[in-house]
Amino acid sequence: MATARPGWSRRAQYGLFFSFLAVIAGIIVGLVLLVVSLVAPDEFGRLRGAALDVTGPVASALHEVTETAHGLVTGADDYWDAVSQNGELKRERKAMLRRMVEAKAIYQENLQLKAALQLRQQTHDAIAAGRIVGSSFNSPRRFAIFSAGGRDGVRVGMPVRSPDGLVGRIIDVGELASRILLVSDRTSIVPARLLRNGIPVIAQGNGDGTVEVRPLEVGRNPFRPGDLIISSGTGGLYPPLVPVARVARLKGDEAIAIPLADPATTSFAIVEPPFEPTAMAAEGQSSTTAP
């Protein structure tokens, strides 16, 4: 019993048949064009021109599509290259900023070190030189830690100064470090005078980073904003002519001044002997009897 052929075989046969017809038609058209080119070259030229008129717009459109696709791919590549270059530039800028900050910090530290060395050379009787490695900020008591102690010859009552001015005095001494009572502490009192006219004054800390300056003569205010306060040497503890503070504003008969030696920005300092030896003995006795 015969069976029917599947549909896909019939479609394949139709496809082969039409393909054969297309090949034959192409051969016939090619032969006709060949004969026309040999018999009537002018007519063949016109046919070629007509063919160009037909295929020209199609080729132009295909070229535009190709160029557009190429431009999109190239633009995407350029965009990603620009993004990567921008990220690299940002990273280089951050690294450069870090190096600038480090260089500035090193430069400032070198300036302070040079100033401390000059101060050490000018002060022939300096006991020890070191760093201020810490200080109190949030407490009304103002202290600083100094990186030199009893092994270096530091004793209680010795004044401490930096290239900017008077820092304070030693109140506690260890073998390797010591504690400084800053001039801005409430219990710190420095006999001083105005540099402008030599009027004697008293500089006492307020416990908030400032110094209150009072004249010995009551009834008039001799201060002006910007006046420089220097130590007078009275009392024998602090040496004379050491800058202490600068007047910031007036307050009744008194003035509020800012210490010139800020422990937050001061790195190096030196310890000097008291202006008079008896002052150190009195200071040591008062430190042992104080609570």
Image: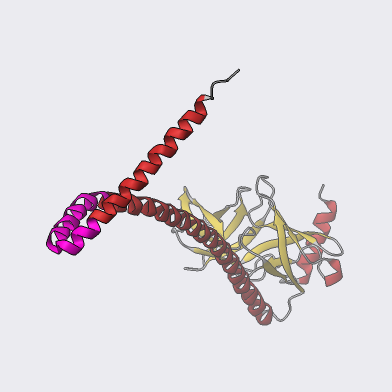
Q: Which residue is farthest front?
A: 1
**Rendered location of residue 177, percent (x, y):** 81, 62
| Residue name at image x 50 percent, y 25 percent | 7
Q: Quadrant of residue 110?
A: bottom right
Q: Quadrant of residue 242?
A: bottom right
Q: How is the image coloured?
A: secondary structure
Q: Is residue 42 inside the magenta stretch?
A: yes
| Residue name at image x 42 percent, y 52 percent | 73
Image quarter of the N terminus: top right
- Stretch of the chain drawn in magenta: 33-59
Q: Which residue is farthest left?
A: 42
Above or below, 108 against 122 in this view is: above
| Residue name at image x 63 percent, y 65 percent | 166
Q: Is residue 20 visible?
A: yes
Q: Is residue 210 inside the magenta stretch?
A: no
Number of dots carrying numbers: 0
Between residue 269 and residue 19, name the one nearer to us: 19
| Most frequent secondary structure within the magenta stretch | helix
Q: Is residue 216 visible?
A: no
Q: Give the side of residue 80 with respect to residue 60, left or right.
A: right
**Rendered location of residue 119, percent (x, y):** 65, 77
**Rendered location of residue 220, percent (x, y):** 45, 54
Between residue 121 and residue 221, name the one nearer to us: 121
Above or below, 128 against 181 in this view is: below
**Rendered location of residue 185, percent (x, y):** 66, 52
